[in-house]
Image (cartoon, rainbow, N blue to C red):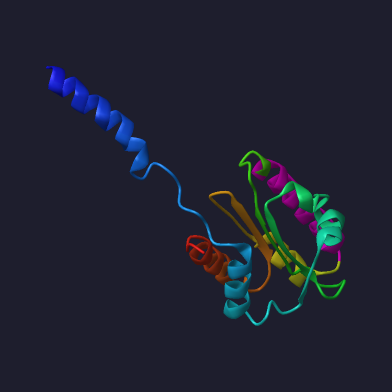
Amino acid sequence: MKKFLVLLFILILAIPAFGCHSPEQAALSQVEADLLAASQNLSGMVKGDDKTLKRYYGLNINDFQEVLIYVPANYMDVSELLVIKVSDPGQLDLIEEAVDTRNAMQLQSFSGYGPEQVELLDNYAFKIVGNTLFYCVSPEADTLKNTFVNSIKNKP
């Protein structure tokens, strides 16, 4: 009986050491390279920065671990790409709300005269993998989402 209890105690201590943690996800620089390779250089989009994230989504870049943002090159286009890696998974709800708000504002802006834009906005791609959120409005949205999923699961 004593051997059994010792063995059980050792087993309980050893379980967390064998795979009870999530693997690291790829850095967004690698995800960006994969996305650029999978599309036509994210046609119709330009890379944004911290000011762009604040302007389009009302989010502060310093609140997140990594941010990748591409926005429309032309004010009559709606193509966008947002990938955010967070330290705290609780932040994902805040980002999702900002994405929903942005998409709703774009739909309202283009609903009267931009049927192609409205169709793209209605068919956006959204995915959360681990602690990383992906949002894309593009004719290639599904392809880019699949590329994101495959890329983010690869270790750096």
Position of residue 40 relative to residue 116, above or below, is below
Given residues 6 and 113, the one toward you in this image is 6
Residue in view at x 57 percent, y 78 percent:
38
Position of residue 16 relative to residue 114, above or below, is above
Image quarter hosting the N terminus = top left
User: Left or right: where does residue 99 sit relative to residue 74?
Assistant: left
Q: Position of residue 141 (x, y in %)?
A: 62, 68
Range covered by the magenta-colored residues: 92-112
User: Left or right: where does residue 31 sit relative to residue 137?
Assistant: left
Please, what is the dominant secondary structure of the magenta stretch?
Answer: helix
Residue in view at x 36 percent, y 41 percent:
17
Q: Position of residue 77 (x, y in %)?
A: 81, 72
Quadrant of res 122:
bottom right
Q: Is residue 101 visible?
A: no
> Which residue appears farthest toward the top when viewing the image?
1
Residue 101 is one of the magenta-drawn residues: yes
Q: Position of residue 37 (x, y in %)?
A: 59, 79
Residue in view at x 31 percent, y 35 percent:
14
Give the tally of numbered discs: 0
Q: Position of residue 128 (x, y in %)?
A: 57, 52
User: Left or right: where does residue 143 sit relative to residue 58?
Assistant: left
Quadrant of res 8:
top left
Residue 36 is one of the magenta-drawn residues: no
Q: Is residue 13 visible?
A: yes
Residue in view at x 76 percent, y 55 percent:
103
